[in-house]
Amino acid sequence: MTEATQPARAKVVVGVDGSDSSLNALRWAAKEARLTGATLHAVTAWEYPLSYGWAAVPDGFDPDGDARAMLEDAVRAVRAEEPDVPITLNVIEGHPAAALLAAAEDASLLVVGSRGHGAFTGVLLGSVGEHCAHHAKCPLVIVRPQEHK
């Protein structure tokens, strides 16, 4: 088979926001990508803070650069664990749920972390995960917090 006739690699999209739950989702998605031969697309999104009227922007304010640095740090650790998985980094300005859904438009799988905050709230799904569960066009995996025994 020539490169032009080879089937496209599967695409796994994972949301990363720097939280422990998103880092667990990134690790899980990297393992899944390795097992299925997929390309991993790590996505982070950022938005300008909401304000009324004019807002002062502090010197050095760089939300895109900060998001990119956070994503690079997260992916660096996963690359060490899964060196053979091709990983693409995507930093998108916009709401996280909309960014993930757009990135997963042609994906074979979307992976997000679950926000577990305790006994009762641990059963709740974060708003991004919930939105993705209702609107994703591909299968969705929600990675739960790991139990510490």
Image (cartoon, helix red, strand yellow):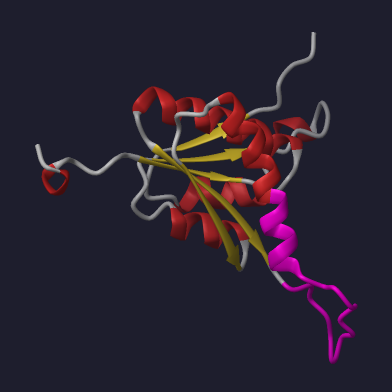
Residue under the image location 75 percent in, 60 percent down: 66
Q: Quadrant of residue 12?
A: top left
Residue nearest the viewer, comparing 148 with 127: 148
How many numbered discs? 0
Residue 142 x %, y %: 57, 34
Above/below status of 61 relative to 108: below
Q: Which residues are magenta?
A: 48-70
Residue under the image location 59 percent in, 36 percent down: 26
Look at the image and say whether residue 76 sits in the magenta stretch.
no
* Image position of 63 (left or right of 14): right
Residue 130 x %, y %: 59, 47
Residue 114 x %, y %: 66, 36
Q: Quadrant of the C terminus?
A: top right
Residue under the image location 75 percent in, 42 percent down: 19
- Residue furthest top in the image: 149
Above/below status of 62 relative to 122: below
Look at the image and say whether residue 58 sits in the magenta stretch.
yes
